[in-house]
Structure formats: structure tokens, C-alpha cells
Image (tube, rainbow, N blue to C red):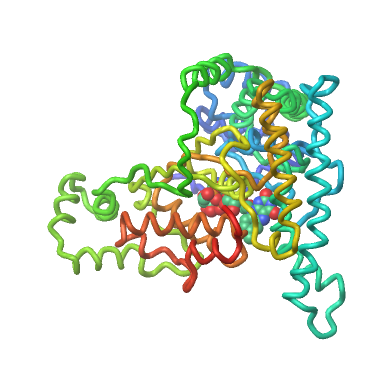
Amino acid sequence: MTAKVERQIYLLSPRELSPETIAVTFAKTSRSPHSFREIAEELTDEKSADFHEKWVVGYGHASVAEHAMLHLAFENISRLAIECIESNRLASYTEKSTRYQKWEPGGYQVPDEVVGTSHEGIYRETCDLLFDEYQRSLGEVRRVVQSMHPPREDESESRWDGRIRSRYVDVCRFLLPASALANVGMTVNARSLEHALGKMFSHPLAEVRQIGEAAKRVVQQEVPTLVKYADRRKHLVESRQEGRRLAHGLSSDGERTMLALVSSDGDAELRVLAAALYEHEPCSFETAMAHVRSLDDRGRSALVEALLGSMDKFDAPTRALEHAVYTIDGLMDQGAYFEVKRHRMMTQTAQRLTAELGYAVPRLITAAGVESSYRAAMHAAAQAYTQLAKWNEEVAAYVVPNGFNRRVLLTFNLREAFHFCELRSAENAHFSVRRVALRLAELIREAHPTLAGRMRMPEGITWQSIEAENFSQV
Ligand SMILES: Cc1cc2nc3c(=O)[nH]c(=O)nc-3n(C[C@H](O)[C@H](O)[C@H](O)COP(=O)(O)OP(=O)(O)OC[C@H]3O[C@@H](n4cnc5c(N)ncnc54)[C@H](O)[C@@H]3O)c2cc1C
């Protein structure tokens, strides 16, 4: 007679077990016939540390560390430093929003590199000027927005402001420099965190390296072994330095196209459809592809309908769409880039933040009568950037406001394109990123109309209409 085996599903609670012990409990199921509960009961923090030292650190069974989850709170760090923290794909973030919160005067980072040097004066003056202009424009743009959106009957002042706040804050954020301080919460597993710390320790900015040191210190209270060996990665430092040396001389060519499709392949749609069939029968991929090629338009449409037709508003499309891949050369304001970079599934190669690619002027800045002081502040920031960059290009980026353009190379698949374009073209998205999402959808649809035509894009608006409505200059 066989023993009755009951299905068991339960949580290993982080309230009872440390992250390292949870990780070992799961790891041990690989060799142990015992239940997770039994394995956990046998463990102590010391035994778990010994296990990790042997298996994760010693034998390189690094995936075990993915079971140790951490929640890191970063407060008052610059938005420039946040870029490094948020550059890790396998982690989750929530940060202080430039859309729903306002920045107070003086809320910026003064990096150690400039403190006490001849550059400190211009650095502080520029950040103060940008913060002053930000404050001033908040009042002026708010007045215009109020006149466009008067209070509703019986609406309190604070409710009215809550309803219209993002409309004027969205515009004034173009003035905020990358030195502006923000908070960010990060949820990450110990394996990804070790990698993230390595990047921080190898970063050219002192602030980022200091944040890395502080993060490692606090994390070791919770996971003493798993990030113990996180350190500066010589390879990261040297490859950055060599890359920079070899790229020297590739100066700006004056090209200012918002998004250019660098590559996509002609067979991608067929490949997606063939992959969708391949899943269901034991044929080779070549046979599935030959079958799709033999279909007429009606046959292919029926296949597309079967794949995507039953999706409702909240369904993600099938993973078969990941077999179509695109590369885009993008130029967008730093505010839009800050939102685009959050799309972790994409591969993103961003250039350094500079003041060399022009800046955007929101239409409401013009309408509020503050365009000349806005331009003066942007001009001052560009001059300060140029002066500081002669000394240290990395540190100079701190004074560059959100309105300046940034270049980023994006590689992503069609499934991610659906997600990004649909989410970021929605009415509640910021107009800077809406413009990008609408143009991106247009490019992808031109390349692959059959599948990309199924993106659930808003009706009646285009990237040109968003641009015309919201920008005096891009
Ligand atoms: C209206 C709105 C307001 C926002 N406000 C803020 C804000 O105030 N502060 C802020 O920090 N951000 C804010 N965001 C950004 C938001 O939190 C996301 O980081 C951003 O939209 C990227 O989206 P994503 O995570 O879905 O995309 P991607 O990273 O592109 O991921 C694509 C998809 O992969 C899946 N996925 C990726 N990673 C994970 C994971 N770790 N776990 C589970 N599933 C995953 C999800 O299905 C996701 O939709 C806002 C976004 C919107 C649309």
C-alpha cells in the first residue's frame, strides 16, 4: 500500500525566519527529502551563514541568494544617484514623484567632489537659481491652470488644488536639476543586490559609492553572508574608462530626431506567429515557419485573432511576442527619460546627462509669462554645466535640469512595446512620456502592422498633437 501524500502549500514567514534562513530552507530541498518546515526547524542563523559561505560564495550556487528578499529605504539621495540604483532589472522601486510632490528650496545634493573647491560657488548658485525659478514658476503656472480649470461647485481649495496640482507641477518639474533629492524604496533579492552594490562601488560619483557602502552596512544586519563580498568591480571601472577613451571625438552630429528605429527584422511577425503554433505540436520551428509563410492574409489574420483577439484591457499579450525585437535611438527630455528608464524589461544604454542636446519649453511656461526667466535659468544651467564639465563631466550632470534632452538606446521586444506604449500613452501619463509612447507605437506599427496594430492605443491623439499642445519647444 502506498502512503497517502497530502498537498501542502504554506508560507515561510519573514516574521519568523531571517532572509538567509529562508534561502537555505529552499536551497536544501534540492538534496533533502524533508519538508520545508522540518528543514527550517533544523536551521539556525549560524548554520545558514555556513551554508551560504560554502554553497553560494564557495561553489557559486548564486541563485540560492534569490530567495533572500530585502526592502531598502533610501532617503535624500540625488536623482542622479537614483539612476544607478534603478538601473537593476531584477528589483522593484517606488520613488518620490516629480508629478505629485513639490520640492522645497535647498532640496539638492552638494556632492563631496565640489565641496571646498573653486567649483562649489557656481554649483550652489546654479542649483539655487533653478530651485528659485521652480518655486516662482509653480505660482505663475498654477494661476494659469486655475483659470483653465476653475473650482467645481462646493469644491474646497485643497480638493481643487489636488485635482489640478499635477498639471502645474508636471510643467515646473522641467526646471528641477538632477541634484534634487528624493526618496526611493527598493525591494530586491540578495543576488541582485550584490550585483547592484558592485555597480555602486564602481560608480564615478562619490555619492553613489557612499550610498553603496551605507546600503551594504545595513543589509549585512539582515543578511550577513550574502552581500559580504560585494565590492568595486575593476572590470566595470576599466571598461567604462576604456570605452570613453575609444569614443572620444564622436561629437554631436546635430541630429535631433525624437525616436529613430535602428533595427527590427522583416520576418519578426511571421516568427511570432510560428512560435505560437510551435508551442502546440511536435514540429520543428522551420516547419511552423513554412506553414505560416504559406498562409494567405486571411489565414494569418485568423492566427493573429486567435493569439490576441480575446485579450481584455488588463491582459498582457502572449510571450510569443517576445520573438520580435526592436532597437530605437531615442532623444527625450530628462523627465521623460526618468520614466522610460523604469521599464526594466528593456535593455537601455543611456548617454551621460549633459546640457549639450537642447532643452524643452513647456507651452504653459510660455502661457504663464515666465518663458524668459525659464530660458535664463536653463541658459545659466547650461553654462554652469559647460564650466563644470571641463573639470568633471560626471559631477557636472548634477546641475542639468529635467528639461534638457538625453539620448538613450532602447532594445525591447514587442510584448514590452505593447506594455510601454499602452501604459505611457494613457491620458494620466505625463505629456513628455506620452509623446514618446505615441511615436514609438507609430514606428512599431509601421514595421509590423499586423501584430502591433493590436496595441490598445488611445483614439484621436497623436504624438504631434501632444507635442503641439504641450510644448513651445522640444
Ligand atoms: C499612473 C502612474 C503613476 C506612477 N507613479 C509613480 C510614482 O509616484 N513613483 C514611482 O516610483 N513610480 C511611479 N510610476 C511608475 C511605475 O511604478 C512603474 O515603475 C513603471 O510604470 C514601469 O512599469 P512596469 O513596472 O509595469 O514596467 P516594466 O518594468 O516595463 O515591466 C513590464 C512588465 O513586466 C512585469 N514585471 C517587471 N518586473 C516585475 C517584478 N519585479 N515583479 C512582477 N512583475 C514584474 C510586469 O507585468 C510589468 O508590467 C507610475 C506609473 C504610472 C503609470
- On the question of residue 7 being in view, the answer is no
Q: Position of residue 426 (x, y in %)?
A: 55, 65
Q: Position of residue 319 (x, y in %)?
A: 39, 52
Q: Is residue 426 above or below residue 266?
A: below
Q: Is residue 389 above or below residue 441?
A: above
What residue lies at 63% left-to-right and 30% top-to-bottom?
Answer: 193
In the image shown, does 464 or 377 lie closer to the viewer?
377
Return the residue found at the far bottom: 153
Q: For residue 202, what is the image quadrant?
A: top right
What residue lies at 67% left-to-right and 46% top-to-bottom?
Answer: 402
- On the question of residue 374 being in view, the answer is yes
What residue lies at 36% left-to-right and 64% top-to-bottom?
Answer: 453
In the image shown, does 82 or 277 lie closer to the viewer?
82
* Quarter of the picture holding the N terminus: top left
Q: Is residue 419 left or right of residue 23?
A: left
What residue lies at 62% left-to-right and 65% top-to-bottom?
Answer: 428
Q: Position of residue 465 (x, y in %)?
A: 51, 66
Q: Is residue 41 above or below residue 104?
A: above
Q: Position of residue 203 (x, y in %)?
A: 64, 23
